Image: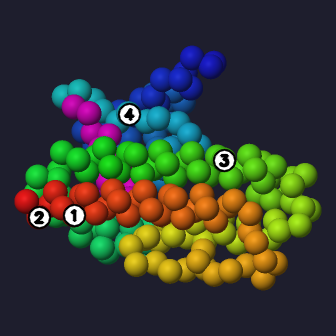
Amino acid sequence: MAETTDKPLLIKRYASRRLYNTETSDYVTLEDIAAFIRDGREVQIVDLKSGDDLTRQYLLQIIAEHESRGENMLPVGVLTDLVRSYTTQSMSVMPQFLSMSFDMLREGQSKMMENMGGMGGLGPMGKMPGMDAIRAQQEAFLKAMTGGMMGSTGPAREEPRGGKAGSGGDDLDEIKKQLAELQDKLGKMGKR
């Protein structure tokens, strides 16, 4: 069964626009597809008749539906920059930038979870002095990444109550610095 999880889950769209899961032989909804993706599964959606790959179209539709329900993860400034990127020379750099940003976010989350004992702070390190300050910085980092980093001076910059926070703040500052540099480069490319 490990073979099937390595390859994308094939979803076929019928002429009636219904989506068919080829592994389980049943119809699925957009929310089902979103759940597969959240569970770590790659998905490929193809038109049954033409064979056209519709994956991008449906992924954008899933994002649009979540955004329209008030689950706003993409700040208006980011959406505006994305629209601009379709009309400027930065379009060739934007996919790479977004991919690198999400890779960095995933890597940072994995490292934080490892450092927290794999249980969000409930592991063996959860009782060490200063862990509350590090956990607060972790939460601030995640809020900054999902709520838009531009102009944010949220709790990550505050001095923790317990004194020194350890090296967690240095990592966050370095990540913010790298993202700011990338945003600056993209901004300069868009003004050419």
**Residue 32 seen anywhere in this rendered image of the structure:** no
28 to 123, vertically: above or below: above
Query: Which residue is rendered at x = 75% and y = 50% of the image?
Result: 115
Q: Which region of the structure is painted magenta?
A: 52-63
Q: Earlier in the sequence, mark 4 or mark 1?
A: 4
Residue at label 4? 44
Is residue 33 toward the left or the right of residue 180 in the image? right
Residue topped by disc 1: 187
Report how far apart the C-alphas of labels 1 and 2 lie in the structure: 7 Å
Residue 22 is a magenta residue: no
Label 2 near label 3: C-beta < 8 Å?
A: no
Relative side of 39 to 102, left or right: right
The dot on residue 191 is: 2
- Residue drawn 31% across the image and 67% down it: 78
**Residue type, mark 2 in image:** Lys
Whole-angstrom CA distance, mark 2 to mark 4, is 36 Å
